[in-house]
Amino acid sequence: GENVEQHPSTLSVQEGDSAVIKCTYSDSASNYFPWYKQELGKRPQLIIDIRSNVGEKKDQRIAVTLNKTAKHFSLHITETQPEDSAVYFCAAIYSNYQLIWGAGTKLIIKP
Amino acid sequence: DGGITQSPKYLFRKEGQNVTLSCEQNLNHDAMYWYRQDPGQGLRLIYYSQIVNDFQKGDIAEGYSVSREKKESFPLTVTSAQKNPTAFYLCASTPASGGADHTGELFFGEGSRLTVL
């Protein structure tokens, strides 16, 4: 069935270093890939998204890359800061316009 | 002040009781969704509605019911048939229910945390 796999489940990086979270999807027709950040006890919030007609998108310290051939997309956070600590979810939209979610990555920024 | 309002924020239920979680949006969005999130887990879709008076089951609809009598409102009832209802429930909406420009961007409420005693 349709699914999105997300890795790693937990990622610990030193403050100031980069973090990379990867997702793969199964439906080649998917054309929209958002990333959400969820702080503890809070609602998920969209941080960046990408459509299938581009390969990369940047917003300050955050970037997303998409490889349609391999059906991979990744979130890159540079110069990590303590406030980046959260759970990050990737998702892909499928032909019925529903989002399929990854299981989440807990990002820990070590001081 | 536009947004999605969920209530109550915290709710305790005894086994065998039905409870209803409220979700109201003033964003004029067509589509609304209910997700369940268990500790350390991702989001699982319970029900969604793309238009008034119509809704579809998601991946884990058993033990839940919904209604969509108004565009602004999409309440979720957790029935006694739901075996393990303790969880964090998130309501969300999107501007459009489909079409070539559909982005899928979800706007979430702050969530309702249900605990069964």
Image (tube, helix red, strand yellow):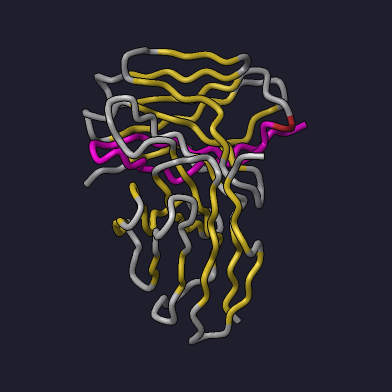
- Residue at far right of view: A111
B83 left or right of B116 in image: left
Q: Residue at left 35%, top 27%?
A: A32
**Vertical side of B2 occupied by B22: above or below:** below
Q: Residue at left 72%, top 26%?
A: A81
**Vertical side of B59 occupied by A19: above or below:** above
Residue extent of the magenta highlight: A84-111
Figure quadrant of residue B102:
top left
Quadrant where the C terminus of chain A sits is: top right
Residue A85 lies, in percent from the top left, at 67, 36
Figure quadrant of residue B3:
top right
- Residue at far bottom of view: B16
Q: Residue at left 49%, top 72%?
A: B85
- Is residue A88 located in the magenta-colored stretch of the structure? yes
**Vertical side of A32 occupied by B46: above or below:** below
**Vertical side of B48 occupied by A28: above or below:** above
Figure quadrant of residue A14:
top right
Q: Main secondary structure of the magenta part?
A: strand
- Is residue B86 located in the magenta-colored stretch of the structure? no
Residue A71 lies, in percent from the top left, at 29, 26
